[in-house]
Image (cartoon, helix red, strand yellow):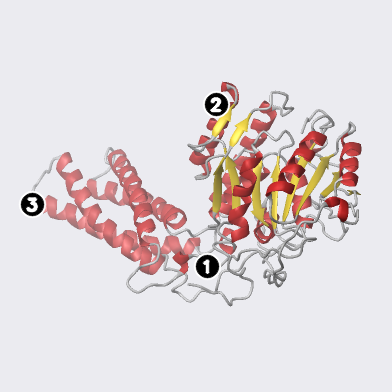
Amino acid sequence: MRTDSSPGTLPAREHLPAGDAGTPVLDVVIPVYNEEKDLQPCVRRLHEHLTHTFPYAFRITIADNASTDTTPQVAARLATELVEVAHIRLEQKGRGRALRTVWSASEAPVLAYMDVDLSTDLNALLPLVAPLISGHSDLAIGSRLARTSRVVRGPKRELISRAYNLMLRGSLQARFSDAQCGFKAIRADVAQVLLPLVEDTGWFFDTEMLVLAERAGLRIHEVPVDWVDDPDSTVHIVRTATDDLKGVCRVGKALATGSLPLDRLTRPFGDDPRDRELADVPRGLARQLVGFCVVGALSTLCYLLLYNLFRQFSGSQAANALALLVSAMANTAANRRLTFGVRGRGGAVRHQAQGLVVFAIGLALTSGSLAALETATASPAHSTELAVLIAANLAATVLRFLLFRAWVFPDRGESGAGPTVVAAHTPSAPAYGSTAPYAPLPRRPAPLPRQPYQREPHEQQPHRPYQTTEIRAGEAADGNWRDATLHPQPVRPHDTDPGDPR
């Protein structure tokens, strides 16, 4: 149900106004570590491209991840020479840490990042951010695996990239096609909600953000890109792959146990047509039917295996009761999480108790069927027993779904539950597993006044370069913001490992 006026709910997506020429609409972040050779040509090329093709004011922010060469001096010189370039230095490494720091402090409504080697063709930048400016999408990613993408890279990287994305699809049910392409953008109001939940500070940062965004029901726009591999890349493939696998396991565990408060993020904008109540259209019925059928098929297989096992040392009635009891408890737990989307441990005991009532009904149906069979035939064949049990279980399955939907796991929107609350970006935002409540999200500031945008020649503008600022990780340029998910936690070993090239 729509709750547009509910406190703590983000407003509907809106097209960003052109605004004042001095206020950047787009902030492109370039995380760098020891990139003294590539930094200057990259930034100048990107600056020239944006100057000639981007119709809004923009900024390019160089995020220096504790470089030990002359990268800070190169970045400072670029920030002095080019008005639209800013420079921030962090004392700890990690691409995710750099993006979190700059994005959290930026006042631009659209935030993006790209790799310093510019492997992705810049002609995809405007199609990347256009859906975010228009309000159509919440995040946008460049995809090297889209059908119309044109990619030049070796077989080793091709195999690793496809295997990694296949693993994400199989383990985390990700539906986006390319998690590793260093060419992504996000709306600032969405970043404000998602960033407190993203724990990783390295290369897995954007993958984790995409998985959480997708699970929260946000829209991810994919742009086919032209991409050429950089043979001089300093990324350690083995170390990066190991960190990614650890991140997949951590996020998968959090999703499986329900420790992530994604229910507070589900469709936060309130403009999803699936939230509308229509007469004679049950909400989520098709998805629940599919999930219930899949769980039911697996439960039936488990039941038959258990029945055959227990039948070796007990009678048919006892074997049926034991097999049905075990499979029914597993069925209730699986339907609770997968079919009806109930996360966390709250109400789990009550749901199992109600599931046992449903189990008793199923037991009465199957036991009655066996009793009727034994009355009709003194010693029925084992295959006949199985056929009768399958038929009885099919009847019990239909009744079980109806009872699950109407009684055990009723639709929370129809049972009087309060509106969904959206997590706010506050210093007290809890991390994984926390039970502390999230504060309501403050309303978005009033839009900028619409003015015709005119870019003046740089030589006619007063030379006011962005000030080069050196800050620590988790601290904004004004010194007021602290990264809530990073500051109170110990530094990970790879963050300060001098051998890490990131």
Instruction: Say which residue label 2 marks.
Output: 159
> With respect to residue 148, does 377 lie above or below?
below
Q: Is residue 389 left or right of residue 145?
A: left
Circle 1 Cα neighbour tier, 10 Å, few/some/many (<14 / 14–19 / ≥20) = some
- Quadrant (top left/top right/bottom left/bottom right) for the C terminus: top right
Instruction: Say which residue label 3 marks.
Output: 376
Q: Is residue 477 left or right of residue 227?
A: right
Alpha carbon separation for disc pair 1 and 2: 39 Å
- Disc 2 vs disc 3: Cβ atoms closer than 8 Å? no
Residue type at mark 3? Ala
Alpha carbon separation for disc pair 3 and 1: 60 Å
- Disc 3 vs disc 1: Cβ atoms closer than 8 Å? no
Q: Kindly identify the residue that appears in the image at 83 percent across and 55 percent down.
A: 476
Residue type at mark 2? Leu
Q: Secondary structure at mark 3?
A: helix
- Quadrant of the rendered image containing residue 356: bottom left
Q: Kindly identify the residue that appears in the image at 27 percent across and 41 percent down.
A: 311
Q: Which dot marks residue 271? A: 1
Alpha carbon separation for disc pair 2 and 3: 62 Å
Q: Secondary structure at mark 2?
A: helix
Q: Secondary structure at mark 1?
A: loop
